[in-house]
Amino acid sequence: MKDVIASRERDSDESDQASFEEELRLALRQADRESRLLNNIEAALKRIESGEYGYCEQTGEPIGLARLMFRPTAKLCIEAKERQEQQEHHYRKARWE
């Protein structure tokens, strides 16, 4: 990979290099997403094996079929997920103030 990047730096003008870097950034981002998704799928399979699949990790309540159909790897019920997102939003907002 480093050889490909190095050869592109020598053989291309600035606009070609910028395009290549953007394509590389997008490819790395996609690979990261796929890696995280694979980890989430493996964790969901373990929860199925242990009998914990379909129950919220925070509340212990059933997650709900609609949510599981939409996101089979869900670990939180919709209420717990909303609370988590509100806390994350509050934290991000507090950091920028």
Image: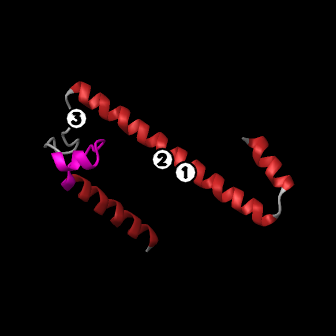
Give residue 58's position: percent from left, percent from top: 21, 45
Residue that numbered label 3 is attached to: 53
* Number of other residues with Cα within 10 Å of mark 1, as a class: few under 14, some 14 to 19, many 20 or more: few
* Number of other residues with Cα within 10 Å of mark 2, as a class: few under 14, some 14 to 19, many 20 or more: few
Residue that numbered label 2 is attached to: 33
Hey, what amino acid is under mark 1?
Arg
Q: Residue at x 65, y 52 (%)?
A: 24
* Residue sticking out furthest to the top: 49
The quarter of the displayed image where residue 59 is located: top left
- Side of 90 relative to 12 (left or right): left
Q: Which comes before the other along the chain, label 3 or label 1?
A: 1
SS type, badge 3? loop
Hey, what amino acid is under mark 2?
Arg
Residue that numbered label 1 is attached to: 29
The reply to whether the magenta stretch includes residue 67 is yes
- Where 10 sits versus 52, above or below? below
State yes or no: discs 3 and 1 in contact (Cβ < 8 Å).
Answer: no
- Quarter of the picture containing the N terminus is top right
- Side of 6 relative to 75 (left or right): right
Residue stretch rendered in magenta on the structure: 64-79
- Where 66 sits versus 95, above or below? above
Q: Residue at x 48, y 40 (%)?
A: 35
Give residue 86's position: percent from left, percent from top: 29, 63
SS type, badge 1? helix
